[in-house]
Amino acid sequence: MRIANVDGRCKLLVDGGQVDLEKASRGRFGPTLGEAYERFGELRGWAESVSSADEVWQADAAGPPAPAPRQVFAVALNYVDHAAESGLAAPDAPVIFTKFPTSLSGPVTDVVLPKGSVDWEVELVAVIGQTARSVSRSVAWDYVAGLTAGQDLSERELQLKGPAPQFSLAKSFQGFSPTGPSLVTPDELDSPEDLELGCELNGEQVQKARTSEMIFTIPQIIEHLSRIVTLLPGDVIFTGTPPGVGLGRTPPRFLCEGDRLGSWVEGIGNLTQTFVAGTDR
């Protein structure tokens, strides 16, 4: 199953087009994705009966597929080569920080550059489909509604400023968490733990890897998180970025006004961000 957020409404993607969830189900399901995640198992069963679309699907009109999560988690240093380019050892347990939900946006956006040094980080993103507490990795996929593509944009000067890192703030400027274009359930993918992901800056490839290279898999991340916090339907987990970020280059390279960043995850789709100058630059 593939679902998307179009004009604030939940759309089921079928046969190259889209179906409005509330209308097609005759009110059985509500219009928003937030409501869909609360009854995701029931929705998946119903969706099997839908075979044809009645509307055109336009990815550039989509919003974030998980538009109102109560919690947004992210994993740092989850690829060995990314840890190395950051000058750090690979961790022996998931390194977690949070992003704020107001930073979420859809797959095709203009992003205002704040003052500082803004970097790119393409990531596979998982969305939780049912309440998870103390979940074993052996059953963790059962708690995943689906996967989507994401960018964990990062303002490095704020992130590294002061006596303690400011990860959450530096990664939560407006538009710093684009996701989409749709949510794809794991059964739609031949190998959900081995997907190519990458990004290009103005047509130049800057990141490319496979999610099988992650140090900690999605089930391991869910097991780790759910032992500490309760994961809720619609919660979002950015699973970490591969090597190739701007900060790890010599000299460092950061995003500029007019830059165009294209990101992708195999079997899921593409993101496109264009960067514009802010008033404080």
Image (cartoon, rainbow, N blue to C red):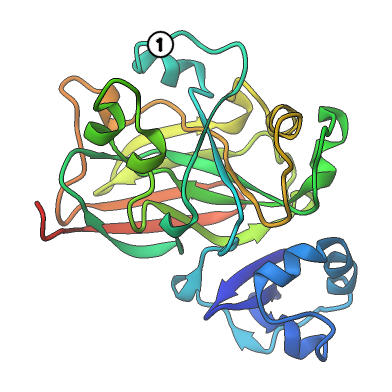
Please name the residue shown 80% across and 43% down the image.
Answer: 132
- How many neighbours does mark 1 have within 10 angstroms: few (below 14), some (14-19), or many (20 or more)? few
Q: Quadrant of the N terminus?
A: bottom right
Residue that mark 1 sits on: 88
Q: Residue at x 65, y 51 (%)?
A: 235
Q: Secondary structure at mark 1?
A: loop
Residue 1 visible? no
Q: Is residue 228 visible?
A: yes
Residue 172 vertical placement versus 229 (above, below): below
Name the residue located 74 percent from the left edge and 63 percent from the top edge.
Answer: 37
Q: Report the front residue among 272 and 105.
A: 105
Tell me residue 99's x, y (percent).
47, 44
Compare residues 266 and 233 and report the one nearer the observer.
233
- Residue shown at 27%/31% (left/top)? 246
The residue at the far front in this view is 163
Q: Amino acid at mark 1?
A: Leu
In this orientation, which residue lies closer to the viewer: 95 or 141? 95
- In the depicted structure, whether residue 6 falls above or below residue 269: below
Q: Quadrant of residue 102?
A: bottom left
- Pinpoint residue 255: horizontal percent, then vertical percent: 21, 44
Q: Is residue 251 left or right of residue 238?
A: left
| Residue 50, percent from left and from top | 83, 79
Give left or right: position of 225 versus 125: right
Question: Up-down: is 1 above or below 28?
Answer: above
Could you tell me residue 279's position as x and y percent?
11, 60
Please say if 94 is above or below 259. Answer: above
